[in-house]
Image (cartoon, rainbow, N blue to C red):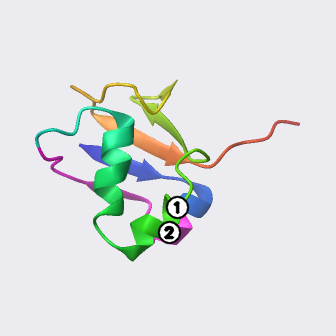
Amino acid sequence: MKIVYFAWVRERIGKAEEQVDVPDGIGTVADLVRWLKSRGEEYQYAFENEGIVRAAVDHTHVKPEASIAGAREIAFFPPMTGG
């Protein structure tokens, strides 16, 4: 699965994207975030406040409880403001 990081999430993790093999049992965006946080300090820092970081599954904005089954791409980004 391809994971893409934007703005300060990218800066904190230190990469714009990566290909990962998600372990069995990771079924939702929230599960994925918890697993990513277990991968190192940079992920813990990026997701230190899970309620702020937004996600999109295959270019559709989703909530943390959304399924990632069959997803090709998950994107994480900070909240955006309009103007």
Percent across and percent down for residue 80 are: 72, 42
Is residue 15 toward the left or the right of residue 72 in the image? right
Circle 1: residue type: Glu
**Disc sitting over residue 48 in the figure:** 1
| Amino acid carrying mark 2 in the image | Tyr
In the drawing, what numbered circle is on residue 45? Answer: 2
| 74 in magenta | no
Residue 83: x and y in percent read: 89, 36
Q: Which residues are magenta?
A: 10-23
- Describe the element under mark 2 as helix, strand or loop: helix
Q: Position of residue 75 (x, y in %)?
A: 44, 42
Q: Residue at x 31, y 45 (%)?
A: 32
Measured along the vertical axis of the image, is residue 38 above or below residue 21?
below
Mark 2, Cα crowd under 10 Å, few <14 / some 14-19 / many 20+, is few
Which residue is at a point 43% across and 66% down the rendered structure image? 44
User: Which element carries disc 1, helix, strand or loop?
Assistant: loop
Residue 21 lies within the magenta run: yes
Check the image and report above or below for 27 versus 36: above
